[in-house]
């Protein structure tokens, strides 16, 4: 076999090393293995600087600045919020693409696909929880990014259009998250989106509002067409819009640079691109390592959070014939739901949000002050803080605790064992609910409400008064009864027509492994007439409420180890025993 002269001169081993180094240099778009070792050792680059070459040759790095001003690389200057927003979008894209494999956007399949994903797909619940957590964090981080830009005056010339595109990205992020809200096809999703899309009906004239509402839902009510529309918005149209405006936004960031701390610039001057050689921090390796370690830390925190606490909720299957009590929008639209409680849909749902959006986009053009220093921007800072306080107040008004209340007995039971969601009782679990009848008042209070004779009859029937329910016997069940009693007391204080109230929890073994919980509330109305409210729920011993996993009831794990353990259960399932 003929050997090339070059190989003969260098030797076989050196030729292999040169080929490996050449391959490494191609992969890293210009960084040789020797230069890479220097970077790891913290040695300065040579001249000319070979670490700048990837910014011209690499597809991924050509949009990144080759160096930064040292002042903008401090974590407390930007908190890496822009970087984190971008990373979360990439994370959402990856986890969303994985979830798409097991999901079909039809009312017949969507909910059962969610159940299958949570119960039968390896790491399915983990991927869904990461996707949901990433979506919530993305909304929060993009919002925080806008707030930071406002407080530091980073919207001032020449960055007006950068701010404008940032506002568009915020709006698209909100609707991107909201469009995914419907996809699980549970009660929470259906009714939150139904309320949200109903605001389109308020657009004048009526024919326009009805048309927009029909386009959003695909029918008078949300069904298969509406679900498909929201699916396409979530996985195709809104991501494309977000990517488009992201690159426009990031191009402007690179063009003008990240604004320096205001105290380091003269008023009206922008020197972000004028970086002295002695104050440059090169992207490779310093900024790259900082950003990579930061994103790895964020990922680790998210994984631990999902593994130990965070659970994406899944309620019962969507039912257009049954409206659950206290339907709420996603938390980032609480403020909008709060506005809907104080005015009609056109003013609160169309006009006022539209005016706020225009004002937000116009901030750079409405603020003529050239200074970015806080001491020179008292009006802007105070206005921003007041706007934040107003948003918090509106958001509180959007919660179920404000202005919308059902009958007191309904509210009491809804708080402790809601129609949708886990609630305290389901968190406590089956084994901490002993069979029997239990009062929310002590013996003396019962006598005061009913009289001695009627109270004694009730006690003789076997009802256990509150003074015989002790924390040391079963703390979890005692907590349930204390919360039941506290809910009644709270409603008594709110409603003058809700008097002499006592509750009874009937825990009945309806079938093997199935208990019925009858929540009975007896009270006197404002006219002094006796009345009674009863609501029943069923709780199965083997029900796996997803909200329980990271909280209290892990008894399902111990049950899996009984009768031969997990391996034995799998053998029985497969018919091997």
Image (spheres, rainbow, N blue to C red):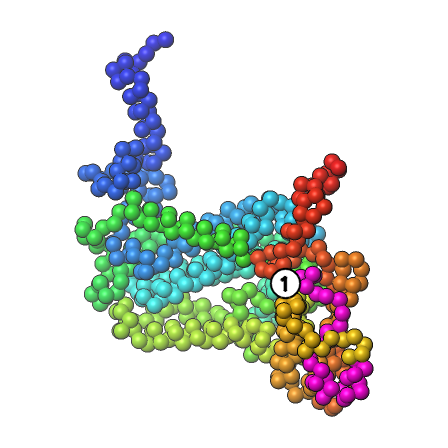
The quarter of the rendered structure image containing the C terminus is: top right
Residue 550 included in the magenta stretch of the image: no
Q: Position of residue 246 (x, y in %)?
A: 41, 53
- Vertical arrangement, residue 227 with respect to residue 292, above or below: below
> Would residue 189 be visible to someone looking at this image?
yes
Identity of the residue furthest to the front in this view: 472
Q: x, y (%) of residue 179?
A: 56, 58
Closest to the observer: 361 or 267? 267
Q: Residue at x 57, y 77 (%)?
A: 402
- Residue 225's place in the image compared with 398, above or below, is above
Quadrant that contains the N terminus: top left
> Residue at position x 44%, y 75% from top?
389
Query: In the visual, does 187 lie left or right of 4?
Result: right
Residue 440 part of the magenta segment: yes
Comparing 419 with 330, the one in front is: 419
The picture places residue 356, in percent across and down from the top left corner, at: 45, 71
Give the residue pinned by disc 1.
Answer: 427
Compared across the picture, whether 178 is left or right of 515 comes to left
- Dot 1, crowdedness within 10 Å: few (<14), some or many (≥20)? many
Q: Residue at x 80, y 85 (%)?
A: 454
Residue at the spot 23% in from the left edge and 66% down from the top edge: 263
The magenta stretch is 429-458
Q: Is residue 457 left or right of residue 358?
A: right
Dominant SS of magenta comes to helix
Residue 346 visible in rendering: no
């Amino acid at each position: 076999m003929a050997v090339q002269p070059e190989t003969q001169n260098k030797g076989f081993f050196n030729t292999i090393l040169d080929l490996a180094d050449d391959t490494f240099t191609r992969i890293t778009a210009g960084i040789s293995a020797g230069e890479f070792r220097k970077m790891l050792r913290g040695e300065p680059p040579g001249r000319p600087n070979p670490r700048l070459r990837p910014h011209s040759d690499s597809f991924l790095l050509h949009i990144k600045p080759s160096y930064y001003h040292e002042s903008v690389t401090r974590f407390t200057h930007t908190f890496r919020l822009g970087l984190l927003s971008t990373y979360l979008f990439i994370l959402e894209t990856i986890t969303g693409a994985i979830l798409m494999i097991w999901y079909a956007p039809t009312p017949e399949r969507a909910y059962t696909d969610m159940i299958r994903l949570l119960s039968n797909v390896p790491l399915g619940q983990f991927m869904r929880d990461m996707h949901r957590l990433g979506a919530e964090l993305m909304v929060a981080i993009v919002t925080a990014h806008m707030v930071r830009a406002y407080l530091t005056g980073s919207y001032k010339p020449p960055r007006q259009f950068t701010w404008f595109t940032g506002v568009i990205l915020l709006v698209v992020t909100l609707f991107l998250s909201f469009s995914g809200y419907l996809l699980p096809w549970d009660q929470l999703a259906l009714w939150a989106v139904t309320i949200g899309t109903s605001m389109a009906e308020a657009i004048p004239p009526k024919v326009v509002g009805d048309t927009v509402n029909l386009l959003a839902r695909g029918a008078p009510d949300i069904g298969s067409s509406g679900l498909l529309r929201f699916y396409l918005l979530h996985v195709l149209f809104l991501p494309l819009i977000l990517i488009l405006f992201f690159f426009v936004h990031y191009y402007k960031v690179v063009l003008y640079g990240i604004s320096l701390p205001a105290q380091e610039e003269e008023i009206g001057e922008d020197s972000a691109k004028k970086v002295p050689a002695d104050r440059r921090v090169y992207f490779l390796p310093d900024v790259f390592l900082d950003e990579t370690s930061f994103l790895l830390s964020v990922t680790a925190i998210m994984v631990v959070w999902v593994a130990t606490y965070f659970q994406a909720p899944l309620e019962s299957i969507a039912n257009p014939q049954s409206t659950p009590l206290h339907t709420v929008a996603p938390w980032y639209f609480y403020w909008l739901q709060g506005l809907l409680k104080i005015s009609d849909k056109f003013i609160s749902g169309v006009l006022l949000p539209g005016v706020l959006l225009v004002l937000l986009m116009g901030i750079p053009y409405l603020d003529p002050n050239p200074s970015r220093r806080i001491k020179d921007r008292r009006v802007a800072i105070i206005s921003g803080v007041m706007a934040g306080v107003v948003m918090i107040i509106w958001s509180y008004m959007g919660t179920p605790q404000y202005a919308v209340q059902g009958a007191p007995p309904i509210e009491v039971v809804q708080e402790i064992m809601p129609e949708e969601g886990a609630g305290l009782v389901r968190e406590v679990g089956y084994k901490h609910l002993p069979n029997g009848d239990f009062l929310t008042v002590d013996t003396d209070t019962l006598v005061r409400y009913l009289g001695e004779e009627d109270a004694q009859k009730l006690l003789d029937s076997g009802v256990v008064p509150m003074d015989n329910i002790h924390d040391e016997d079963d703390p979890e069940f005692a907590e349930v009864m204390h919360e039941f009693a506290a809910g009644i007391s709270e409603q008594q204080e709110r409603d003058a027509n809700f008097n002499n109230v006592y509750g009874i929890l009937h825990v009945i073994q309806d079938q093997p492994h199935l208990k019925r919980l009858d929540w009975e509330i007896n009270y006197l109305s404002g006219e002094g007439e006796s009345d009674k409210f009863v609501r029943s729920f069923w709780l199965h011993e083997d029900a796996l409420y997803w909200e329980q996993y990271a909280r209290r009831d892990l008894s399902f794990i111990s049950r899996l180890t009984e009768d031969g353990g997990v391996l034995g259960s799998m053998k029985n399932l497969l018919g091997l025993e």
